[in-house]
Amino acid sequence: MGNWLQEIELCGKQIKLVPLTVSHKEELLEAASDGELWKLWYTSVPSSENIETYLDIALSEQKSGSSLPFVVFSLKTNKIIGCTRYCNMEKQNRRLEIGYTWYAKSSQRTGVNTECKYLLLQYAFEKLDCIAVEFRTNWFNYSSRNAITRLGAKQDGVLRSHRIDANGILRDTVVFSIIQMEWPVIKKSLEYEMGKYL
């Protein structure tokens, strides 16, 4: 399973996705401080208090072959502006999840997310031959739910009391997916949307 997805860089017109390393620590903290994103209680964004744990978990999942975390690098500013990840990868079922995505506040609503997801979906469907790509988010993360829907993903359902967060609060998880047969039309839609930002 660890050989299904090797480290790769994915490059678009606005951004480049580069495999996460420990050396990205300070730039990630700088990006997260743009909007103090760690204050969003319903999502997982690193702060100075938990950045080491954040990196340790991401890189250990990569080593086990279940995840490939990326930093989102802006080609315009030459700075890291966020993070995203292929996760819960199942080679035998040819499916994976795109998750742990966040962007500096100044990079939100700029077309960055559209291009980021386009690059990840294109690689998943056209190179890895995925049958399905999944997205999951907290029920209360309305902006994430709306962003996922705008991609063209369909809601599969809600996992009630699915996770216990760091504060002991039960999380309802909303599950979305895009399946292989939907990719051609979603690809066309995303390319149209990306054209608005160029």
Image (cartoon, grey):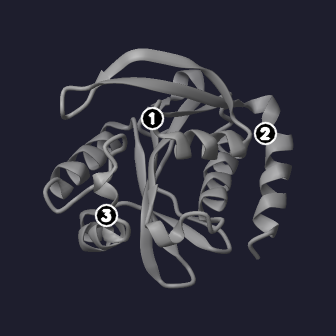
User: Identity of the amino acid at label 3?
Assistant: Glu
Residue that appears at 24% across and 50% down: 54
Give, as a three-letter code, the residue at label 2.
Trp
Residue at the bottom extreme of this rendering: 77
At x 51%, y 58%, the residue is: 8
- Mark 2, secondary structure of its residue: helix
Give the mark toward the camera: 2 or 3.
3
- The local crowd at label 1, few if under 14, some if 14 to 19, many if 20 or more residues have their Cα within 10 Å, is some
Q: Nearer the viewer, residue 46 or 129?
A: 46
Check the image and report above or below for 6 versus 125.
Answer: below
Tag 1 secondary structure: loop
Quadrant occupied by the C terminus: bottom right
Return the residue at label 1. 140
The reply, left or right, for residue 91 in relation to residue 64 is: right
The N terminus lies in quadrant? top left
30 vs 20, nearest the viewer:
30
| CA distance for labels 2 and 1 | 27 Å
The residue at which mark 3 appears reads as 36
Marks 2 and 3, how far apart in space? Answer: 34 Å
**Are the residues flagged by discs 2 and 3 in contact, CB closer than 8 Å?**
no
Q: Position of residue 94 (x, y in %)?
A: 60, 28
Viewed as shown, does residue 188 lie left or right of 151? right
Which numbered disc covers residue 183?
2
Q: CA distance from mark 3 to mark 1?
A: 18 Å
Q: Residues within 10 Å of mark 3 (few under 14, many from 20)?
A: some
Q: Position of residue 163 (x, y in %)?
A: 32, 23
